[in-house]
Image: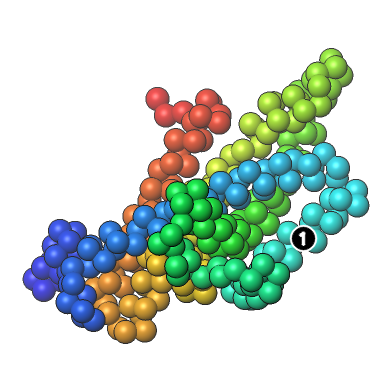
Amino acid sequence: QQYYLWLKKLFTGRLYSFKDGRPVLEKIKERIGNTLLLNLVATLIIFSLAIPLGVFSAKRQYSFLDHLGTFGAYLGISTPGFWIAYLLILGTVMLFGYPVLGMRSFVTENFTMAELVLDRTWHLMLPSIILAIHGIAGISRYTRSSMLEVIRQDYVRTAKAKGVPEETVYYKHALRNALLPIITIFGFLIPSLIGGSIIIETVFAWPGIGRLSFQAVLARDYPVVMTTLTISAVLTLLGNFIADILYGIADPRIRYR
């Protein structure tokens, strides 16, 4: 019965923080927009760079640029994000002398609207790039492998023989059939970005759910911890659901009837 009451409080938003007694949902509502903004920008960066890089590497297989891209991808996968973050923070401050921590500068009262937008963009881009590095490295490799399987098929050779432009062959015909493994990765990317943002938000003092979760773990604030874990579980289900929909869009043969 106690477990049932706890579940009821969890799903009705009646859990309260051990640390300050505030409702957990109220604390999450204050920060969830910041985390979603960070992850949205990171996702856009990942797919706008990873897929073209993967296609280019497949087109230029075993070339110098392909080997360079492979080396860069493995370097991006194996290098800890927090280490890159600290290096970039140090380098940015030394080069530009402008703070990068938090969501905005400390003194913004006299800023115009344009200056406020630029200031917010400045503070947003660096953590978004760091958060996207592992995704770019991994998805570009998956795209390359999938494209290499597709471009060896007969219909691709036939399209080339008929004089179809190379970009049309690769991006219109081959890429669509190579998307299924990438869509699978996308399904797991949503919850993994939330998990990865814990470190990035902590390093950059970004006021999001990841940083809230980390502070809750240190304070043993279990209601907050359990609620954020539940959100991650829901995002996992949501990611798989979106992936199933995208499967049907990418390949009509597997649409549910």
Out of 55 and 157, give the one closest to the viewer. Answer: 55
Residue at the (41%, 71%) spot, across then down: 211
**In the shown orientation, is residue 15 left or right of residue 64?**
left
Residue at the (60%, 68%) spot, across then down: 98
Counting from the top left corner in percent of width and height, residue 105 is at 48, 66
For the question of whether residue 145 can be seen, the reply is: yes
Counting from the top left corner in percent of width and height, residue 95 is at 70, 69
Residue farthest top in this picture:
162
In this rendering, is residue 231 above or below 65?
below
Out of 19 and 30, give the one closest to the viewer. Answer: 30
Residue neighbourhood size for the residue with mark 1, other residues' Cα within 10 Å, grouped as few (<14), some (14–19), many (≥20): few
Out of 125 and 59, give the one closest to the viewer. Answer: 125
Identify the residue under disc 1: 72
Q: Tag 1's secondary structure?
A: helix
In this rendering, is residue 156 above or below 140?
above
Q: Tell me the quarter of the picture where residue 94 sits.
A: bottom right
Residue farthest right in this picture:
64
